[in-house]
Amino acid sequence: MNITSQMVKDLRDKTGAGMMDCKKALSENAGDMEKAIDFLRQKGLAVAAKRAGRATSEGVIEAYIHAGGKLGVMVELNCETDFVAKTDAFREFARDVAMHVAAANPVSLSRDDVPADIVERERQIYVQQALDSGKPANIVEKMVVGKIDRYLSEICLLEQQFVKNPEKSIQDMLTELIGKMGENVSIRRFARFQVGV
């Protein structure tokens, strides 16, 4: 199939990938736009995995203050070079993450960072709920494992569904950014401040 420049442009507009990557994706998928998008996403995952070990010592600290000034967030987003840190896409992602933290109020960055006492408290609540509903003990543990997994996905920033686009998690967006920027990017930390809390 003949890959036109308009097809490449359309794919680039949808994914933000480079022109040559878009052309290759379309060529390898016979011009099928959806398959080309999937191809680029998979490639982005591979690029992200390759770059995961690289040091991220540059970046930005982005602040978001919600209307009224009673809620504020600071996010540290790191990358490998100051060149990437100054790009619009990088800064926009940092702003989006700060705004998301303000709206979704995550407890931690990832599952590894969730305090054990919080997980144990939730586990006890779920066990008691299951026992009170009359479930047998062997079923209770399976139910609790599933509920804990869902709970953790709701409180960990990287697993949360992005408030502006619930079809993607923050981790999905981070992986796409890594693929687009061509270097390792990481969310180092965040702090959320709310008056009276």
Image (spheres, rainbow, N blue to C red):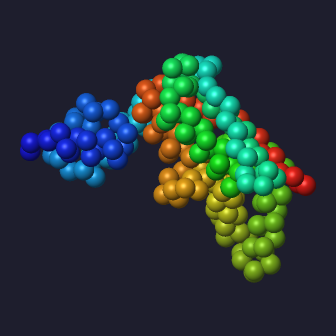
Task: State the residue in front, 171 or 116.
Answer: 171
Residue farthest front in this picture: 68
Q: Residue 155: x percent and y percent?
A: 70, 53
On the picture, is 81 further left or further right than 75? left
Task: State the residue in front, 182 or 90.
Answer: 90
On the picture, is 38 further left or further right than 152? left
Residue farthest left in this picture: 1
Q: Quadrant of the C terminus?
A: bottom right
Which residue is pictured at 54% across the width and 18% down the height? 81
Which residue is pictured at 50% across the width and 45% down the height? 172
Q: Residue 135: x percent and y percent?
A: 72, 77
Q: Residue 34: x percent and y percent?
A: 28, 52
Which residue is pictured at 20% across the width and 50% down the height? 32
Q: Residue 65: x percent and y percent?
A: 73, 46
Q: Quadrant of the N terminus?
A: top left
Is any atom of residue 106 visible in this view?
no
Total numbered circles:
0
Q: With respect to residue 181, does 64 lie above or below? A: below
